[in-house]
Amino acid sequence: MFDELTDKLGNVFAKLRGRGVLTENDIKEGMREVRRVLLEADVNFALTREFLERVEKQAVGVLQLKSIQPAQQLVKIVHDELTAMLGERREGLKMSSVPPTIIMMVGLQGSGKTTTAGKLARRLKLEAKSTRLVAADVYRPAAIDQLETLGKALDVPVYADRTTQDVVKIAKAGIEQGVRNRDRVVIVDTAGRLQIDADMMDELTRLKAAIKPDEILFVADGMTGQEAVKIAQGFNEALDITGVILTKLDGDARGGAALSIYGVLKKPIKYIGVGEKPDALEEFHPERMAGRILQMGDIVSLVEKAQEAFDETEAKKLEKKVRKDGMDLEDFLSAMRQMQKLGPFENLLKLLPGVNPKMLKDVKMDPKRMKHIEAIVLSMTPQERKKPDIINGSRRARIAKGCGRPVNEVNRLLDQFREMQKMMKKMGGGAGGKGGGMPRI
Ligand code: GDP
Protein backbone atom coordinates (compact mmCIF):
# COMPACT_ATOMS: atom_id res chain seq x y z
CA MET A 1 0.00 0.00 0.00
CA PHE A 2 1.47 3.36 -1.05
CA ASP A 3 4.92 1.81 -1.15
CA GLU A 4 6.30 4.44 -3.47
CA LEU A 5 4.95 7.35 -1.46
CA THR A 6 6.29 5.82 1.74
CA ASP A 7 9.64 5.16 0.20
CA LYS A 8 10.05 8.66 -1.24
CA LEU A 9 8.96 10.42 1.94
CA GLY A 10 11.34 8.16 3.84
CA ASN A 11 14.17 9.37 1.63
CA VAL A 12 13.32 13.03 2.18
CA PHE A 13 13.41 12.63 5.94
CA ALA A 14 16.49 10.43 5.90
CA LYS A 15 18.29 13.24 4.11
CA LEU A 16 17.13 15.79 6.68
CA ARG A 17 18.13 13.53 9.55
CA GLY A 18 21.56 13.19 8.02
CA ARG A 19 22.07 16.92 8.31
CA GLY A 20 21.76 17.04 12.09
CA VAL A 21 21.33 20.77 12.58
CA LEU A 22 18.74 22.18 10.20
CA THR A 23 18.76 25.60 8.62
CA GLU A 24 15.75 27.39 7.27
CA ASN A 25 16.97 26.50 3.83
CA ASP A 26 17.18 22.78 4.63
CA ILE A 27 13.59 22.83 5.76
CA LYS A 28 12.48 24.79 2.70
CA GLU A 29 14.20 22.34 0.43
CA GLY A 30 12.81 19.37 2.35
CA MET A 31 9.31 20.77 2.06
CA ARG A 32 9.75 21.36 -1.65
CA GLU A 33 10.59 17.69 -1.96
CA VAL A 34 7.59 16.67 0.13
CA ARG A 35 5.45 18.78 -2.18
CA ARG A 36 6.82 17.01 -5.23
CA VAL A 37 6.28 13.59 -3.66
CA LEU A 38 2.68 14.39 -2.76
CA LEU A 39 1.88 15.71 -6.21
CA GLU A 40 3.52 12.66 -7.79
CA ALA A 41 1.30 10.51 -5.58
CA ASP A 42 -1.61 12.35 -7.22
CA VAL A 43 -2.72 14.28 -4.14
CA ASN A 44 -5.06 17.16 -4.85
CA PHE A 45 -3.13 20.33 -5.68
CA ALA A 46 -4.93 22.74 -3.37
CA LEU A 47 -4.73 20.30 -0.48
CA THR A 48 -1.01 19.84 -0.99
CA ARG A 49 -0.49 23.60 -0.87
CA GLU A 50 -2.54 24.02 2.32
CA PHE A 51 -0.77 21.07 3.89
CA LEU A 52 2.66 22.55 3.25
CA GLU A 53 1.66 25.97 4.46
CA ARG A 54 0.61 24.49 7.77
CA VAL A 55 3.74 22.36 8.09
CA GLU A 56 6.04 25.26 7.22
CA LYS A 57 4.43 27.52 9.78
CA GLN A 58 5.13 24.99 12.51
CA ALA A 59 8.58 24.17 11.20
CA VAL A 60 9.72 27.71 11.95
CA GLY A 61 9.07 26.88 15.60
CA VAL A 62 11.39 23.87 15.37
CA LEU A 63 14.21 26.14 14.21
CA GLN A 64 13.61 28.66 16.96
CA LEU A 65 13.55 25.99 19.63
CA LYS A 66 16.91 24.68 18.45
CA SER A 67 15.68 21.22 19.34
CA ILE A 68 18.04 18.28 19.55
CA GLN A 69 16.44 16.23 16.84
CA PRO A 70 14.94 18.75 14.45
CA ALA A 71 14.25 16.24 11.67
CA GLN A 72 12.32 14.03 14.09
CA GLN A 73 10.28 17.03 15.15
CA LEU A 74 9.55 17.73 11.54
CA VAL A 75 8.37 14.15 11.00
CA LYS A 76 6.03 14.60 13.96
CA ILE A 77 4.58 17.78 12.46
CA VAL A 78 4.13 16.10 9.08
CA HIS A 79 2.55 13.10 10.83
CA ASP A 80 0.01 15.26 12.63
CA GLU A 81 -0.85 17.23 9.51
CA LEU A 82 -1.12 14.05 7.47
CA THR A 83 -3.48 12.66 10.09
CA ALA A 84 -5.60 15.82 9.83
CA MET A 85 -5.63 15.49 6.06
CA LEU A 86 -6.80 11.89 6.30
CA GLY A 87 -9.68 12.71 8.60
CA GLU A 88 -8.33 13.37 12.12
CA ARG A 89 -9.98 10.44 13.89
CA ARG A 90 -11.60 7.13 13.08
CA GLU A 91 -15.29 7.25 12.37
CA GLY A 92 -17.10 3.95 12.56
CA LEU A 93 -20.48 3.02 11.17
CA LYS A 94 -23.44 4.92 12.55
CA MET A 95 -25.77 2.34 14.04
CA SER A 96 -29.44 3.24 14.32
CA SER A 97 -31.04 3.01 17.75
CA VAL A 98 -33.88 0.97 16.28
CA PRO A 99 -32.66 -1.97 14.19
CA PRO A 100 -32.02 -2.59 11.44
CA THR A 101 -29.36 -0.07 10.52
CA ILE A 102 -29.72 0.52 6.79
CA ILE A 103 -26.58 0.92 4.72
CA MET A 104 -26.80 1.94 1.08
CA MET A 105 -23.74 1.14 -1.02
CA VAL A 106 -23.20 3.43 -4.01
CA GLY A 107 -20.49 3.85 -6.60
CA LEU A 108 -19.52 3.29 -10.21
CA GLN A 109 -19.49 -0.10 -11.85
CA GLY A 110 -16.26 -1.92 -11.22
CA SER A 111 -15.35 0.13 -8.17
CA GLY A 112 -15.74 -2.94 -5.98
CA LYS A 113 -19.18 -2.15 -4.59
CA THR A 114 -20.62 -5.66 -4.56
CA THR A 115 -17.42 -7.25 -3.26
CA THR A 116 -17.23 -4.60 -0.54
CA ALA A 117 -20.88 -5.14 0.44
CA GLY A 118 -19.95 -8.79 1.06
CA LYS A 119 -16.79 -7.87 2.99
CA LEU A 120 -18.74 -5.49 5.18
CA ALA A 121 -21.43 -8.10 5.84
CA ARG A 122 -18.73 -10.57 6.87
CA ARG A 123 -17.15 -8.08 9.22
CA LEU A 124 -20.48 -7.14 10.83
CA LYS A 125 -21.32 -10.80 11.26
CA LEU A 126 -18.01 -11.30 13.06
CA GLU A 127 -19.05 -8.45 15.35
CA ALA A 128 -22.17 -10.50 16.14
CA LYS A 129 -24.47 -8.17 14.21
CA SER A 130 -26.82 -10.26 12.09
CA THR A 131 -26.68 -8.80 8.62
CA ARG A 132 -28.71 -9.16 5.43
CA LEU A 133 -27.69 -8.19 1.92
CA VAL A 134 -30.19 -6.81 -0.58
CA ALA A 135 -29.52 -7.07 -4.32
CA ALA A 136 -30.81 -3.83 -5.80
CA ASP A 137 -28.44 -3.82 -8.76
CA VAL A 138 -31.05 -5.00 -11.24
CA TYR A 139 -29.52 -4.00 -14.56
CA ARG A 140 -26.64 -6.39 -14.39
CA PRO A 141 -28.15 -9.84 -13.76
CA ALA A 142 -24.66 -11.09 -12.97
CA ALA A 143 -24.56 -8.66 -10.03
CA ILE A 144 -27.46 -10.46 -8.34
CA ASP A 145 -25.76 -13.83 -8.91
CA GLN A 146 -22.50 -12.40 -7.60
CA LEU A 147 -24.14 -11.18 -4.39
CA GLU A 148 -25.98 -14.48 -3.90
CA THR A 149 -22.76 -16.44 -4.35
CA LEU A 150 -20.98 -14.16 -1.90
CA GLY A 151 -23.84 -14.48 0.58
CA LYS A 152 -23.71 -18.26 0.36
CA ALA A 153 -19.96 -18.34 0.87
CA LEU A 154 -20.19 -16.02 3.87
CA ASP A 155 -23.37 -17.52 5.23
CA VAL A 156 -25.14 -14.17 5.06
CA PRO A 157 -28.75 -14.10 3.81
CA VAL A 158 -29.38 -12.27 0.54
CA TYR A 159 -32.69 -10.81 -0.56
CA ALA A 160 -33.23 -10.72 -4.34
CA ASP A 161 -36.26 -10.48 -6.63
CA ARG A 162 -35.63 -11.17 -10.29
CA THR A 163 -39.25 -10.51 -11.29
CA THR A 164 -39.06 -6.74 -10.99
CA GLN A 165 -36.73 -3.86 -11.86
CA ASP A 166 -38.33 -1.56 -9.31
CA VAL A 167 -35.39 -1.01 -6.99
CA VAL A 168 -37.43 0.86 -4.39
CA LYS A 169 -39.79 -2.10 -4.16
CA ILE A 170 -36.87 -4.55 -3.90
CA ALA A 171 -35.03 -2.54 -1.25
CA LYS A 172 -38.19 -2.06 0.81
CA ALA A 173 -39.05 -5.76 0.65
CA GLY A 174 -35.48 -6.67 1.61
CA ILE A 175 -35.57 -4.31 4.59
CA GLU A 176 -38.99 -5.71 5.58
CA GLN A 177 -37.45 -9.15 5.63
CA GLY A 178 -34.63 -7.77 7.78
CA VAL A 179 -37.16 -6.31 10.24
CA ARG A 180 -39.04 -9.62 10.45
CA ASN A 181 -35.81 -11.49 11.09
CA ARG A 182 -34.63 -8.94 13.65
CA ASP A 183 -31.45 -8.26 11.69
CA ARG A 184 -29.13 -5.62 13.09
CA VAL A 185 -27.98 -4.41 9.68
CA VAL A 186 -29.33 -4.45 6.13
CA ILE A 187 -26.89 -3.59 3.34
CA VAL A 188 -28.45 -2.51 0.05
CA ASP A 189 -26.19 -2.99 -2.98
CA THR A 190 -27.24 -0.55 -5.71
CA ALA A 191 -26.56 -0.36 -9.44
CA GLY A 192 -23.54 1.49 -10.74
CA ARG A 193 -22.77 2.75 -14.22
CA LEU A 194 -19.51 3.29 -15.97
CA GLN A 195 -19.83 7.03 -15.43
CA ILE A 196 -22.03 9.33 -13.43
CA ASP A 197 -25.30 9.73 -15.30
CA ALA A 198 -28.58 11.44 -14.56
CA ASP A 199 -30.69 8.26 -14.61
CA MET A 200 -28.49 6.55 -12.05
CA MET A 201 -28.47 9.56 -9.73
CA ASP A 202 -32.21 9.90 -10.10
CA GLU A 203 -32.75 6.30 -9.12
CA LEU A 204 -30.38 6.56 -6.16
CA THR A 205 -32.05 9.76 -4.96
CA ARG A 206 -35.47 8.07 -5.08
CA LEU A 207 -34.09 5.06 -3.27
CA LYS A 208 -32.56 7.25 -0.59
CA ALA A 209 -35.87 9.07 -0.05
CA ALA A 210 -37.75 5.77 0.18
CA ILE A 211 -35.50 3.79 2.53
CA LYS A 212 -33.90 6.62 4.54
CA PRO A 213 -30.55 4.91 5.04
CA ASP A 214 -28.43 5.52 8.14
CA GLU A 215 -25.30 5.31 6.02
CA ILE A 216 -24.70 6.03 2.35
CA LEU A 217 -21.25 4.65 1.67
CA PHE A 218 -19.55 5.67 -1.53
CA VAL A 219 -17.24 2.94 -2.80
CA ALA A 220 -14.28 4.46 -4.64
CA ASP A 221 -11.67 2.70 -6.70
CA GLY A 222 -8.44 3.77 -5.00
CA MET A 223 -6.43 2.98 -8.12
CA THR A 224 -8.02 5.85 -10.02
CA GLY A 225 -6.52 8.67 -7.93
CA GLN A 226 -7.98 12.12 -8.47
CA GLU A 227 -10.64 10.68 -10.74
CA ALA A 228 -12.07 8.86 -7.70
CA VAL A 229 -12.20 12.15 -5.83
CA LYS A 230 -14.06 13.86 -8.68
CA ILE A 231 -16.60 11.06 -8.91
CA ALA A 232 -17.05 11.10 -5.14
CA GLN A 233 -17.85 14.80 -5.36
CA GLY A 234 -20.56 14.04 -7.92
CA PHE A 235 -22.15 11.41 -5.70
CA ASN A 236 -21.86 13.62 -2.65
CA GLU A 237 -23.60 16.55 -4.32
CA ALA A 238 -26.54 14.36 -5.32
CA LEU A 239 -26.79 12.11 -2.27
CA ASP A 240 -24.96 13.77 0.61
CA ILE A 241 -23.03 10.58 1.31
CA THR A 242 -22.09 9.70 4.90
CA GLY A 243 -18.78 7.99 4.27
CA VAL A 244 -16.31 6.49 1.83
CA ILE A 245 -14.81 3.05 1.35
CA LEU A 246 -11.63 3.08 -0.73
CA THR A 247 -10.92 -0.18 -2.52
CA LYS A 248 -7.94 -1.74 -4.24
CA LEU A 249 -5.35 -0.13 -2.01
CA ASP A 250 -3.43 -3.40 -2.16
CA GLY A 251 -2.41 -2.65 -5.73
CA ASP A 252 -0.17 0.06 -7.08
CA ALA A 253 -2.43 2.86 -5.86
CA ARG A 254 -0.31 5.94 -5.56
CA GLY A 255 -2.26 7.15 -2.57
CA GLY A 256 -3.67 10.34 -4.03
CA ALA A 257 -7.30 9.33 -3.57
CA ALA A 258 -6.85 8.29 0.05
CA LEU A 259 -4.95 11.46 0.85
CA SER A 260 -7.38 13.81 -0.85
CA ILE A 261 -10.87 12.46 -0.46
CA TYR A 262 -11.47 13.61 3.10
CA GLY A 263 -9.91 17.02 2.50
CA VAL A 264 -12.08 17.65 -0.54
CA LEU A 265 -15.35 16.14 0.68
CA LYS A 266 -15.06 16.38 4.44
CA LYS A 267 -16.63 12.93 4.58
CA PRO A 268 -14.79 10.20 6.50
CA ILE A 269 -13.11 7.19 4.94
CA LYS A 270 -14.60 4.38 7.02
CA TYR A 271 -12.92 1.32 5.56
CA ILE A 272 -10.32 0.38 2.99
CA GLY A 273 -10.29 -2.63 0.67
CA VAL A 274 -6.93 -4.34 0.48
CA GLY A 275 -7.58 -7.42 -1.64
CA GLU A 276 -10.16 -9.46 -3.42
CA LYS A 277 -10.89 -11.93 -0.63
CA PRO A 278 -13.79 -11.36 1.79
CA ASP A 279 -11.48 -10.66 4.73
CA ALA A 280 -9.51 -7.98 2.88
CA LEU A 281 -11.30 -5.02 4.45
CA GLU A 282 -9.64 -2.89 7.12
CA GLU A 283 -10.99 -0.20 9.37
CA PHE A 284 -9.55 3.13 8.36
CA HIS A 285 -7.75 5.03 11.13
CA PRO A 286 -6.26 8.34 9.96
CA GLU A 287 -3.54 8.43 12.58
CA ARG A 288 -2.45 4.86 12.01
CA MET A 289 -2.40 5.36 8.27
CA ALA A 290 -0.26 8.49 8.63
CA GLY A 291 2.07 6.44 10.83
CA ARG A 292 2.31 3.72 8.21
CA ILE A 293 3.03 6.19 5.42
CA LEU A 294 5.80 7.78 7.48
CA GLN A 295 7.17 4.39 8.54
CA MET A 296 6.39 4.99 12.16
CA GLY A 297 4.71 1.59 12.15
CA ASP A 298 1.24 0.49 13.00
CA ILE A 299 1.58 -1.93 15.87
CA VAL A 300 -2.04 -1.50 16.89
CA SER A 301 -3.26 -2.79 13.53
CA LEU A 302 -0.79 -5.65 13.74
CA VAL A 303 -2.15 -6.74 17.09
CA GLU A 304 -5.73 -6.42 15.88
CA LYS A 305 -4.93 -8.46 12.82
CA ALA A 306 -3.45 -11.16 14.97
CA GLN A 307 -6.47 -11.17 17.23
CA GLU A 308 -8.83 -11.51 14.31
CA ALA A 309 -6.86 -14.30 12.63
CA PHE A 310 -6.09 -16.45 15.64
CA ASP A 311 -8.70 -18.88 16.64
CA GLU A 312 -8.54 -18.31 20.35
CA THR A 313 -9.93 -21.68 21.40
CA GLU A 314 -7.51 -23.45 19.09
CA ALA A 315 -4.60 -21.36 20.36
CA LYS A 316 -5.49 -22.00 24.00
CA LYS A 317 -5.81 -25.72 23.37
CA LEU A 318 -2.45 -25.71 21.68
CA GLU A 319 -0.80 -23.75 24.43
CA LYS A 320 -2.17 -26.04 27.13
CA LYS A 321 -1.03 -29.12 25.31
CA VAL A 322 2.43 -27.72 24.60
CA ARG A 323 2.86 -26.66 28.21
CA LYS A 324 1.90 -30.13 29.38
CA ASP A 325 3.58 -32.45 26.89
CA GLY A 326 6.04 -30.24 25.03
CA MET A 327 5.75 -29.45 21.39
CA ASP A 328 5.50 -32.06 18.68
CA LEU A 329 5.30 -31.69 14.93
CA GLU A 330 1.50 -31.69 14.93
CA ASP A 331 1.57 -28.60 17.15
CA PHE A 332 4.21 -27.05 14.96
CA LEU A 333 1.98 -27.50 11.91
CA SER A 334 -1.02 -26.15 13.71
CA ALA A 335 0.90 -23.02 14.85
CA MET A 336 2.16 -22.50 11.32
CA ARG A 337 -1.35 -22.71 9.93
CA GLN A 338 -2.55 -20.08 12.39
CA MET A 339 0.32 -17.82 11.46
CA GLN A 340 -0.47 -18.20 7.83
CA LYS A 341 -3.92 -16.78 8.37
CA LEU A 342 -2.28 -13.44 9.09
CA GLY A 343 -1.47 -13.09 5.43
CA PRO A 344 1.84 -12.68 3.65
CA PHE A 345 4.76 -12.25 6.00
CA GLU A 346 6.08 -9.17 4.23
CA ASN A 347 2.76 -7.36 4.72
CA LEU A 348 3.02 -7.88 8.46
CA LEU A 349 6.55 -6.53 8.51
CA LYS A 350 5.36 -3.32 6.91
CA LEU A 351 3.37 -2.58 10.05
CA LEU A 352 6.53 -2.43 12.13
CA PRO A 353 8.20 0.95 12.71
CA GLY A 354 11.03 1.88 10.42
CA VAL A 355 10.45 -0.91 7.95
CA ASN A 356 10.94 0.41 4.49
CA PRO A 357 8.97 -1.31 1.72
CA LYS A 358 12.16 -1.46 -0.36
CA MET A 359 13.89 -3.53 2.30
CA LEU A 360 11.15 -6.09 1.99
CA LYS A 361 11.99 -7.11 -1.54
CA ASP A 362 14.35 -9.74 -0.10
CA VAL A 363 12.22 -11.16 2.66
CA LYS A 364 9.29 -12.33 0.57
CA MET A 365 8.43 -15.74 1.93
CA ASP A 366 7.52 -18.22 -0.72
CA PRO A 367 3.90 -19.25 -0.02
CA LYS A 368 4.76 -22.65 -1.48
CA ARG A 369 7.16 -23.23 1.41
CA MET A 370 4.26 -23.58 3.82
CA LYS A 371 2.61 -26.12 1.51
CA HIS A 372 5.87 -28.08 1.43
CA ILE A 373 6.20 -28.07 5.19
CA GLU A 374 2.64 -29.27 5.43
CA ALA A 375 3.28 -32.04 2.91
CA ILE A 376 6.39 -33.20 4.78
CA VAL A 377 4.64 -33.35 8.16
CA LEU A 378 1.61 -35.08 6.67
CA SER A 379 3.73 -37.81 5.15
CA MET A 380 5.07 -38.78 8.58
CA THR A 381 3.36 -41.43 10.65
CA PRO A 382 1.45 -40.17 13.72
CA GLN A 383 4.15 -41.68 15.89
CA GLU A 384 6.88 -39.80 14.03
CA ARG A 385 5.00 -36.55 14.44
CA LYS A 386 4.75 -37.13 18.17
CA LYS A 387 8.36 -38.26 18.59
CA PRO A 388 10.47 -36.71 15.83
CA ASP A 389 13.58 -38.13 17.50
CA ILE A 390 12.82 -41.56 16.06
CA ILE A 391 13.09 -40.23 12.52
CA ASN A 392 16.33 -41.83 11.33
CA GLY A 393 17.92 -41.81 7.89
CA SER A 394 15.70 -44.42 6.30
CA ARG A 395 12.57 -42.81 7.71
CA ARG A 396 13.71 -39.47 6.31
CA ALA A 397 14.11 -41.01 2.87
CA ARG A 398 10.65 -42.57 3.10
CA ILE A 399 9.07 -39.27 4.18
CA ALA A 400 10.80 -37.40 1.36
CA LYS A 401 9.56 -39.92 -1.16
CA GLY A 402 6.05 -39.83 0.26
CA CYS A 403 5.66 -36.08 -0.11
CA GLY A 404 7.77 -35.60 -3.21
CA ARG A 405 10.23 -33.20 -1.55
CA PRO A 406 14.03 -33.61 -1.41
CA VAL A 407 15.53 -35.22 1.70
CA ASN A 408 17.49 -32.07 2.57
CA GLU A 409 14.19 -30.22 2.95
CA VAL A 410 13.01 -32.84 5.42
CA ASN A 411 16.30 -32.45 7.27
CA ARG A 412 15.99 -28.70 7.34
CA LEU A 413 12.50 -28.85 8.76
CA LEU A 414 13.56 -31.27 11.50
CA ASP A 415 16.54 -29.08 12.37
CA GLN A 416 14.38 -26.00 12.62
CA PHE A 417 11.88 -27.87 14.69
CA ARG A 418 14.57 -29.01 17.11
CA GLU A 419 15.89 -25.44 17.36
CA MET A 420 12.46 -24.27 18.28
CA GLN A 421 11.98 -26.98 20.87
CA LYS A 422 15.25 -25.90 22.47
CA MET A 423 14.19 -22.28 22.44
CA MET A 424 10.92 -23.16 24.12
CA LYS A 425 12.63 -25.15 26.82
CA LYS A 426 14.77 -22.12 27.56
CA MET A 427 11.64 -20.02 27.82
CA GLY A 428 10.32 -22.32 30.51
CA GLY A 429 8.79 -25.12 28.58
CA GLY A 430 5.75 -23.10 27.59
CA ALA A 431 4.54 -21.87 24.27
CA GLY A 432 5.37 -18.36 25.32
CA GLY A 433 2.17 -16.57 24.44
CA LYS A 434 -1.34 -16.77 23.21
CA GLY A 435 -0.44 -17.66 19.66
CA GLY A 436 1.15 -20.92 20.71
CA GLY A 437 4.66 -19.67 20.06
CA MET A 438 6.05 -18.14 16.95
CA PRO A 439 7.94 -20.66 14.89
CA ARG A 440 10.77 -19.09 12.95
CA ILE A 441 11.21 -20.54 9.51
P1 GDP B 1 -18.94 -3.42 -8.63
O1 GDP B 1 -19.24 -3.41 -10.12
O2 GDP B 1 -18.67 -2.06 -8.13
O3 GDP B 1 -19.96 -4.16 -7.82
O4 GDP B 1 -17.54 -4.16 -8.50
P2 GDP B 1 -17.17 -5.62 -8.03
O5 GDP B 1 -17.50 -5.82 -6.60
O6 GDP B 1 -17.73 -6.62 -9.00
O7 GDP B 1 -15.56 -5.56 -8.14
C1 GDP B 1 -14.88 -5.32 -9.35
C2 GDP B 1 -13.53 -6.01 -9.31
O8 GDP B 1 -12.68 -5.40 -8.34
C3 GDP B 1 -13.62 -7.47 -8.90
O9 GDP B 1 -12.74 -8.22 -9.70
C4 GDP B 1 -13.16 -7.47 -7.44
O10 GDP B 1 -12.59 -8.70 -7.06
C5 GDP B 1 -12.16 -6.36 -7.47
N1 GDP B 1 -11.95 -5.74 -6.14
C6 GDP B 1 -12.85 -5.20 -5.31
N2 GDP B 1 -12.28 -4.71 -4.19
C7 GDP B 1 -10.95 -4.95 -4.30
C8 GDP B 1 -9.80 -4.67 -3.47
O11 GDP B 1 -9.86 -4.07 -2.39
N3 GDP B 1 -8.60 -5.09 -3.97
C9 GDP B 1 -8.47 -5.74 -5.16
N4 GDP B 1 -7.27 -6.10 -5.56
N5 GDP B 1 -9.52 -5.99 -5.96
C10 GDP B 1 -10.75 -5.61 -5.54
Image (spheres, rainbow, N blue to C red):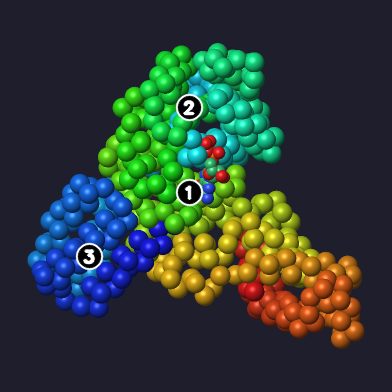
Q: Residue at x 46, y 14 (%)?
A: 210
Q: Earlier in the sequence, mark 1 or mark 2?
A: 2
Residue contact between numbered discs 1 and 3, judged by CB atoms under 8 Å:
no
Q: Amino acid at mark 1?
A: Lys
Q: Earlier in the sequence, mark 1 or mark 3?
A: 3
Element under label 1? Answer: loop
User: Does residue 66 appear in this view?
Assistant: no
Mark 1 Cβ and ligand 1 under 8 Å apart:
yes
Point out which mark residue 28 bears. none
Element under label 3? Answer: helix
Q: Which residue is mark 2?
A: 104
Q: Amino acid at mark 2?
A: Met
Could you tell me how far apart the alpha carbons at marks 1 and 3 are, in whole angstroms? 27 Å
Q: Amino acid at mark 3?
A: Glu
Q: Residue at x 22, y 49 (%)?
A: 45
Q: Which residue is mark 3?
A: 33
